[in-house]
Image (tube, grey):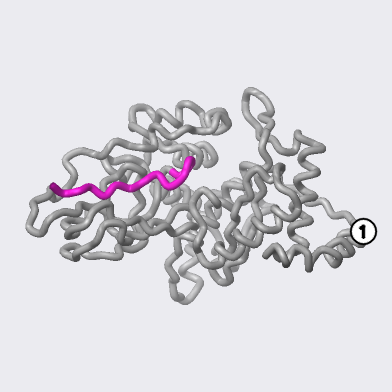
Amino acid sequence: MATKVIMPQLGESVVEGTVTKWLKAEGDTIEEFEALVEINTDKVDTEIPSPASGVLLKLYVRENQTVSAGTLLAMVGESGEKVPEAPAAPVAQLVEAAPEPQVAHAMVPAAVVTAQGLGFISPVVARIAAEHSLDLNTIQGTGRNRRITKKDALEAVKTRSADPWDSPASGELFRPSEEVYGSGKGSSPASTHAPGEIIPHTPVRRSIAEHMLRSVGTSPHVTTVMEADMGRVVAHRAAHTTQFARDGVKLTYTAYFAAAAVAALKAVPIVNASWSDDGIVLHPQINLGIAVSMGDEGLIVPVIKQAESLSLLALAGVLNDLAVRARAEDLKPDEV
């Protein structure tokens, strides 16, 4: 009997993923636990193994297609075994049972989540709709059973924002240069420039753009500059670098900055909080996001979870581990 290959839920808040590469083609033989497909979820690529040995009988999802957790990806069985050309019914959505943060419910209007009979709307799609005031009833879903995917929602945002003169910030003081955008609605940016090469967006680049845009509506952006005497930190690092190295840990200044952030959040808990309509949500855990450069691919932000329970040595060790695995593209979805 053929075995189903199901899109797994690769993290508590990971509700969908993009099939970036099939490692086997239809008709290929495959062993149980052998890598079958690469899935990208929020900047992280994960190899999904085959659940059984046999022949890859059918692929139901093409490369670069985004699907929700629980979606049937492929079938593995004996050579010549008959399988449906298309799934008879959608596999039960694992994401429906996934816990959603209470803050997300407070930030996303109920009307958006239910979307007037559109069926299940993932938290990611609901958040995009809330942040950009999208009417989901006007979006044609491309997912299974016409479900609206994250890609559909982002395309709707992109389409609506295509005309710079329709932007909320394009008044006289913020109007883009006519040299770039033309002299009005009748002009097209493409008409004033020679055609150039289009480099397709990678999943990482798309994710970075989405997160940067989302951050504008999620967190107040302020900049504060002050001076600090780092003399004691420099002396402490010089005195303990060799000791930490004996424990296999490279002591960097980033570890001190992380420890200082933890101390500050402990001293002022209101900073480690989120807004909700019901009130300020104070978070008991301190989770630090540390940006790591991936060269030309951009930045990725691994998370040190429960940093409040870690010593300086432990913080430095976790930082080393996450940075090395981030550059090796070996992070897990829950670590980003």
- Provide residue 301's location: percent of width, then percent of height: 60, 56
- Closest to the observer: 229 or 156? 229
* Span colored in magenta: 1-14
Name the residue tied to disc 1: 229
Q: Secondary structure at mark 1?
A: loop
**Can residue 4 be found in the magenta stretch?**
yes
Q: Main secondary structure of the magenta part?
A: loop
Q: Residue furthest front?
A: 246
Residue at 59% from the left image edge and 62% from the top image edge: 299
Residue lying farthest to the top in this orientation: 278
Give the image location of residue 127, x and y in percent.
50, 39
| Magenta stretch encompasses residue 198 | no
Q: Nearer the viewer, residue 12 or 29?
A: 29
Q: Quadrant of residue 9?
A: top left
Q: Is residue 182 left or right of residue 237?
A: left
Q: Percent position (x, y) of residue 310?
A: 71, 47
